[in-house]
Amino acid sequence: MIYRFLRLIKYYLVYSFRSRSFVFMALLNVFISILILLVMSSSGTLLKSFVPGNIKQIELPTFLRERVYNFQWANILIYIPILSAAFFGSTAIPYEYERGTIYNLYSLPITRFQFVLSRVMGATILSFLSTLIIVGFQFFSVAIYFRRMPDDTFVFYVLLLLLVTFSDVTMAVAISTFFKNSGHSAIAFLIVYLVIFNIFSLVGTDAGIIPAIFIKTNADRVLYGIFLNSDPYFLTYSFSLSPLPENTILFISSILLFYSFTSILIAYGVTMLRREYR
């Protein structure tokens, strides 16, 4: 049973690695990385909106300048797992309909849960690998610019990136189970993530119904909170040169895991209810 499950993941990965989507996403991430490097090297700071103007980075100690540097990279990187999830997670199941291979897959001696999980795992691997291209550029730019290897925080940063990517992909796969068209599925995922969740964040937090951190779009920002306790996307912009406390990071990570497991259960439930899956 496990062997068939792994074969299913391998089949999806081999086909996807040869697809134009993966090549395009990889080249796009290379292009984005080069743009970030050019802006960083030319201005010394990526976007002044990320760091208040009264903070002069040149006057900060080296370790704080490195935090600010990584913080600005992560502010751009935060959007890449979303795009990768739209590319790979949103198309993982609908694309099988478009190719006409869905019924062959369902004839295999595997459970529907294994099928959903194989698509989640495969899409997560693809999304994470493509995103690591930018992380690689960031790693070497830090090493060159500060003339030392990044500290252990960078390892934790990569692990959080994996968690954020996994949660984004699971949500994309869950939404994709409602569609048979890859384009419709990707658009629906982006609308849910970028529009609906942000509306919930604005309305819910303003009315005091739900804490902002419980909204997926806000929880994902833990990715740069590991460097600085700041969020330039909130209406009330606060800035601190200290990172988020460890207990806060762990709490937000549990929220992301909750979203992930809930999305997997939704995807499994939809596959069981749809007629062609039986």
Image (tube, grey):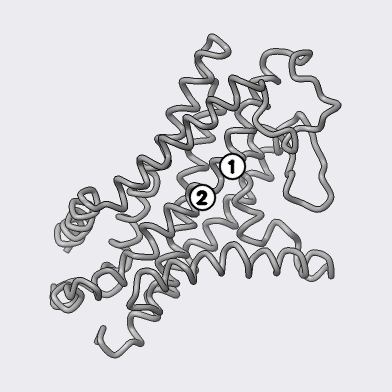
| Crowd rating for badge 2 (residues with CA inside 10 Å; few <14, some 14–19, many 20+) | many
Judged left or right of residue 57, residue 126 is left
Q: Which mark is residue 209?
A: none
Q: Which residue is mark 1?
A: 223
The N terminus - image quarter = bottom left
| Crowd rating for badge 1 (residues with CA inside 10 Å; few <14, some 14–19, many 20+) | many
Judged left or right of residue 249, residue 12 is left
Judged left or right of residue 146, residue 241 is right
Q: Residue at x 59, y 27 (%)?
A: 39
Q: Which residue is mark 2?
A: 164
Q: Residue at x 43, y 36 (%)?
A: 31
Q: Compared to 186, does 159 lie above or below?
A: above
* x then y, percent, for residue 124: 37, 52
Q: Compared to 232, does 259 lie above or below?
A: below
Q: Residue at x 63, y 39 (%)?
A: 224
Pick whichever, 245 or 124, lies toward us.
124
Q: Marks 2 and 1, how far apart in space?
A: 8 Å
Q: Compared to 210, does 144 lie above or below?
A: above
Residue at disc 2, secondary structure: helix
* x then y, percent, for residue 82: 50, 54
Amino acid beneath label 2: Val
User: Do residues under tags 2 and 1 come within 8 Å of each other at their CB atoms?
Assistant: yes
* x then y, percent, for residue 180: 33, 78
Q: Residue at x 40, y 79 (%)?
A: 178
Amino acid beneath label 1: Leu
* x then y, percent, for residue 155: 49, 30
Judged left or right of residue 209, residue 88 is left
